[in-house]
Amino acid sequence: MSELLSGPGLNGRGLALVPKSDAKQSMKEYKSDQEVRWCPGCGDYAILAAVQSFVPELGLKRENMVFVSGIGCSSRFPYYMNTYGFHSIHGRAPAIATGLAASRPDLSVWVITGDGDSLSIGGNHLIHALRRNVNLNILLFNNRIYGLTKGQYSPTSEIGKVTKSTPMGSLDKPFNPISLAIGAEASFVARTIDSDRKHLQSVLREAAEHKGTSLVEIYQNCNIFNDGAFDQLKDPEQRDDITLRLEHGQPIASASKAVRRAADGGIEVVPRAEVAENEILVHDAHRADPSLAFALSRLDEPAFAHVPIGVFRSVDRPSYDELMSAQLEEAVAQRGPGSLDDLLLSGDTWRIG
């Protein structure tokens, strides 16, 4: 059966027919028959379990969900989801998913990628998907290392990182995926962490309901080649002090720190005890101007002194597939149905033989 969604939902908030499941679904139905093969203790297991237990809430038919991945440890993900899937080529998952989402608005399309896959060879594909606002959800697993190829430094590795490919330490300034996405005018940008299932699923829920491209950076531990990269955010004695929770309409603060406007017009993190409650910056995820969201994305420097977690930006603008459909309808109304033969034989053509 198909029904037109009338409220916030997948594929454009009521702009597309989304086939719904008649039966209540469970996590078990989204587990494929494939053996899950990641290193024991890998953060990918936690993300997979969180996704498998979350997607039944969407109420979609499994045949109307597609997971597209590139190359890397995270890109094994489609094998483990009992939905349609596409294990594509290095860095090109957003391009393949763009074609799928644009041509099939009845599908819920998810891209699974890693920091190496999406920010190195796949960098251009990622930023163009974001700026176009294609109707898909991108989950970027960031472990700050190349895991599948055995521990080389990645585009998110910190300066000075000693790896097999940088024995004297990396010289590259790392990408900040959140800053990059906001700079590309992404309409939905968020960050979460593999070990916090409640927060991870709440972010996924908001991403799924968003019209257009959603990008969710997930801090994911690689316990073989970069173990403990995010320990500060998981340590019960530190996490509440350094984690700045981003919730729309709520003050941006941790247990001991708060964000306020600085004298130069920017923002700064100060001890919470030194600032009045009405001086703490209130988060506005729906602000059209991306400058504040970008400023928030820079607060994770110096590294892990304080880290914003949550939805940085969630704004409404037309999705690429929505605009494309309208353009096609206008063309048909003006010129009538097109003919592929007429197109191929138009202009300067000739036959051989």
Image: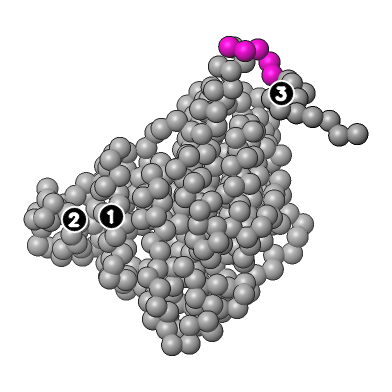
- Give the residue pinned by disc 1: 296
Q: Earlier in the sequence, mark 2 or mark 1?
A: 2
Query: Residue 195, how many percent across, how many down?
Result: 48, 64
Q: Residues within 10 Å of mark 1 (few under 14, many from 20)?
A: many
Tag on residue 346? 3
Q: Which residues are magenta?
A: 334-338
- Give the residue pinned by disc 2: 267
Foreground pick, 265 / 8: 265
Judged from the image, the secondary structure of the residue bearing numbered disc 3 is loop
Residue at 19% x, 62% y: name it: 269
Foreground pick, 107 / 295: 295
Q: Is residue 333 visible?
A: yes
Q: Earlier in the sequence, mark 3 or mark 2?
A: 2
Q: Quadrant of residue 72?
A: bottom right
Amino acid tagged 2: Ile
Amino acid tagged 3: Ser
Residue at 28% x, 67% y: name it: 301
Residue at 61% x, 53% y: name it: 92
Give the foreground label among 1 and 3. Answer: 3
